[in-house]
Image (spheres, helix red, strand yellow):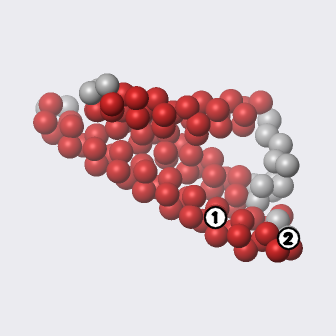
Amino acid sequence: MVELNTFGYVYVTIVITLGPLVAAGFMVARKQKIGALLLVLTMFGSFIFGVWYHFLSNTSDNVTQVHGPWHSKFLWTAIALAVIELAGAAVGFRMWRARSERSGF
Protein backbone atom coordinates (compact mmCIF):
# COMPACT_ATOMS: atom_id res chain seq x y z
CA MET A 1 0.00 0.00 0.00
CA VAL A 2 1.38 3.36 -1.03
CA GLU A 3 0.51 6.25 1.23
CA LEU A 4 0.56 9.82 -0.06
CA ASN A 5 0.17 13.08 1.78
CA THR A 6 -2.80 15.33 1.03
CA PHE A 7 -0.92 17.12 -1.74
CA GLY A 8 -0.07 13.76 -3.34
CA TYR A 9 -3.67 12.57 -3.33
CA VAL A 10 -4.94 15.87 -4.75
CA TYR A 11 -2.19 15.88 -7.41
CA VAL A 12 -2.89 12.29 -8.46
CA THR A 13 -6.63 12.94 -8.64
CA ILE A 14 -6.46 16.20 -10.59
CA VAL A 15 -3.30 16.04 -12.70
CA ILE A 16 -2.79 12.33 -13.31
CA THR A 17 -6.37 11.02 -13.35
CA LEU A 18 -8.72 13.83 -14.37
CA GLY A 19 -6.35 16.02 -16.41
CA PRO A 20 -5.85 13.69 -19.39
CA LEU A 21 -9.58 12.86 -19.43
CA VAL A 22 -10.47 16.56 -19.53
CA ALA A 23 -7.87 17.05 -22.29
CA ALA A 24 -9.52 14.28 -24.32
CA GLY A 25 -12.90 15.91 -23.73
CA PHE A 26 -11.61 19.21 -25.11
CA MET A 27 -10.25 17.44 -28.17
CA VAL A 28 -13.55 15.68 -28.83
CA ALA A 29 -15.37 19.00 -28.38
CA ARG A 30 -13.19 20.54 -31.11
CA LYS A 31 -11.17 22.61 -28.64
CA GLN A 32 -8.06 20.80 -29.82
CA LYS A 33 -5.53 23.51 -29.07
CA ILE A 34 -6.45 23.80 -25.39
CA GLY A 35 -6.89 20.03 -25.17
CA ALA A 36 -3.40 19.47 -26.56
CA LEU A 37 -1.89 22.01 -24.17
CA LEU A 38 -3.66 20.40 -21.22
CA LEU A 39 -2.39 17.00 -22.39
CA VAL A 40 1.19 18.32 -22.47
CA LEU A 41 0.91 19.78 -18.98
CA THR A 42 -0.77 16.79 -17.38
CA MET A 43 1.42 14.15 -19.01
CA PHE A 44 4.61 16.04 -18.17
CA GLY A 45 3.30 16.62 -14.66
CA SER A 46 2.61 12.90 -14.37
CA PHE A 47 6.14 12.17 -15.56
CA ILE A 48 7.71 14.48 -12.97
CA PHE A 49 5.55 13.03 -10.18
CA GLY A 50 6.35 9.44 -11.22
CA VAL A 51 10.09 10.02 -11.53
CA TRP A 52 10.13 11.66 -8.11
CA TYR A 53 8.18 8.92 -6.33
CA HIS A 54 9.52 5.90 -8.23
CA PHE A 55 13.19 6.82 -8.56
CA LEU A 56 14.28 9.81 -6.45
CA SER A 57 12.36 9.99 -3.18
CA ASN A 58 12.85 7.74 -0.19
CA THR A 59 9.31 6.36 -0.04
CA SER A 60 7.67 2.94 -0.16
CA ASP A 61 6.88 3.61 -3.84
CA ASN A 62 10.55 3.83 -4.81
CA VAL A 63 11.81 0.98 -6.99
CA THR A 64 14.62 0.30 -4.53
CA GLN A 65 12.08 -0.39 -1.75
CA VAL A 66 10.23 -3.17 -3.57
CA HIS A 67 11.90 -6.52 -2.95
CA GLY A 68 11.26 -10.12 -3.85
CA PRO A 69 9.54 -11.42 -6.95
CA TRP A 70 7.83 -8.09 -7.68
CA HIS A 71 11.01 -6.01 -7.85
CA SER A 72 11.73 -6.60 -11.54
CA LYS A 73 8.11 -6.13 -12.61
CA PHE A 74 7.78 -2.93 -10.59
CA LEU A 75 11.05 -1.54 -11.96
CA TRP A 76 10.12 -2.21 -15.59
CA THR A 77 6.56 -0.92 -15.23
CA ALA A 78 7.89 2.26 -13.59
CA ILE A 79 10.28 2.74 -16.52
CA ALA A 80 7.54 1.98 -19.06
CA LEU A 81 5.19 4.41 -17.36
CA ALA A 82 7.81 7.18 -17.51
CA VAL A 83 8.36 6.52 -21.23
CA ILE A 84 4.61 6.55 -21.93
CA GLU A 85 4.14 9.78 -19.99
CA LEU A 86 6.95 11.49 -21.91
CA ALA A 87 5.55 10.18 -25.18
CA GLY A 88 2.10 11.53 -24.25
CA ALA A 89 3.63 14.93 -23.50
CA ALA A 90 5.49 14.88 -26.83
CA VAL A 91 2.33 13.96 -28.76
CA GLY A 92 0.40 16.69 -27.00
CA PHE A 93 3.14 19.21 -27.77
CA ARG A 94 3.18 18.28 -31.46
CA MET A 95 -0.61 18.60 -31.60
CA TRP A 96 -0.53 21.97 -29.80
CA ARG A 97 2.22 23.24 -32.09
CA ALA A 98 0.36 22.13 -35.22
CA ARG A 99 -2.84 23.86 -34.03
CA SER A 100 -0.86 26.98 -33.06
CA GLU A 101 0.73 27.26 -36.50
CA ARG A 102 -2.72 27.09 -38.09
CA SER A 103 -4.21 29.75 -35.82
CA GLY A 104 -1.18 32.02 -35.64
CA PHE A 105 -0.41 31.61 -31.92
Quadrant location of the C terminus in the rendered image: top left
Q: Position of residue 38 (x, y in %)?
A: 42, 34
**Do labels 2 and 1 touch, CB within 8 Å?**
no
Residue position for label 1: 77
From what the image shows, is residue 69 above or below residue 7? Answer: below
At 69% from the left and 61% from the top, the residue drawn is: 55
Choose top left, top right, bottom left or bottom right for residue 33.
top left
Q: Residues within 10 Å of mark 1 (few under 14, many from 20)?
A: few
Amino acid beneath label 1: Thr
Residue at image coords 35%, 51%? 91
Residue 41 at what x, y percent from top left?
Answer: 45, 39
Res. 23 visible in picture:
yes
Q: Who comes first in sequence, dot 2 or dot 1?
A: 2
SS at circle 1:
helix
Q: Is residue 39 left or right of residue 96?
A: right
- Of all residues, the one furthest to the front in this rendering is 28
Q: Mark 2 falls on what kind of element? A: loop
Residue positioned 72% across, 65% down in the render: 74
Q: Which mark is residue 67?
A: 2
The 10 Å Cα crowd at callout 2, few under 14, some 14 to 19, many 20 or more, is few
Q: Residue at x 40, y 35 (%)?
A: 24
| Residue 32 rendering spot, x and y as whole percentages | 29, 32
Q: From this viewpoint, is residue 34 visible?
A: no
Measure the C-alpha gap from mark 2 to mark 1.
15 Å
Q: Mark 2 is on which residue type?
A: His
